[in-house]
Amino acid sequence: MQKAVLMMDYLNVSQKANSSFSHKGDKALDLSGKDKGKDYLKAPFTGIVKRIYTNANAVWLESKDKVEYADGTVDYMTVMTLHDNDVSDLKVGDVINQGEVYYQEGTRGQATGNHIHLAVGKGKFTGNGWYKNSYGVWCINNQYDVYKALFLLDTVKIINGGGYDWKKTNDLDVVNTYIVQKGDRIFM
């Protein structure tokens, strides 16, 4: 079973959960990486792209199997990311392996600077993936605290952890898959 892991080189929480403006009543975090550049996010688990909403380039990735949450919960997990400037390389149904780069910071949608809006939902993808809360903020279905859901790799450099109690790990069950292509030579 894979651990669900937040995999960025740098952790910089630029907007906390349930804060003013775009996170009121929302458990999502905004992550800004090392600086105002475009840091990459790697898949926290092996998952399937369930929905892409191009207005803000929102992508929902559902774990292929149950995963271990940082707080010990074992269940399926869905993550939603927003603001990548270009998701044309992704399609619904794509399988993304844990540790593969699949998303990067950007400004697509209502974003004032490069960042990734990251939300976690407990369980499988449901409905259309999100709902509008009483504050008018769009939230992932079955929202779950990001720091309770995702481990941090020991190698992540924390610039600003947002005051959250992140659980670290260096124990990964990364699955590397290669599909044999026509013309490949296999030696036995």
Image (spheres, rainbow, N blue to C red):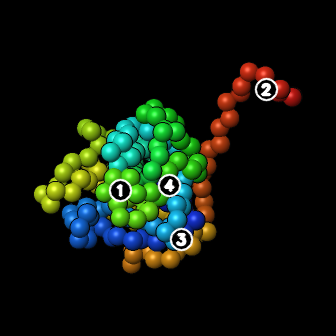
- Identify which amino acid the numbered label 2 is placed on: Asp
Left or right: 184 in relation to 83 = right
Q: Secondary structure at mark 4?
A: strand
Q: Is residue 185 above or below residue 138?
A: above
| Residue located at (65% from left, 37% from top) | 177
Q: Are marks 2 and 4 in contact (CB under 8 Å)?
A: no
Between the residue at mark 4 and the residue at mark 1, the CA separation in whole angstroms equals 15 Å
Q: Which residue is mark 3?
A: 34
- Depth check: give the residue in front, 153 or 88: 88
| Front of the two marks 2 and 3 | 3
- Name the secondary structure under disc 2: loop
**Residue type, mark 3 in image:** Lys
The mark found on residue 119 in the picture is 1
- For marks 1 and 3, the one nearer the N-term is 3
- In three-dimensional space, the C-alpha distance between marks 2 and 3, rounded to whole angstroms, equals 40 Å
Mark 3 is surrounded, within 10 Å at the Cα level, by few (under 14), some (14 to 19) or many (20 or more) other residues, namely some
Spatial CA distance of label 4 from label 3 is: 12 Å
Distance, label 2 to label 1, CA atoms, is 40 Å
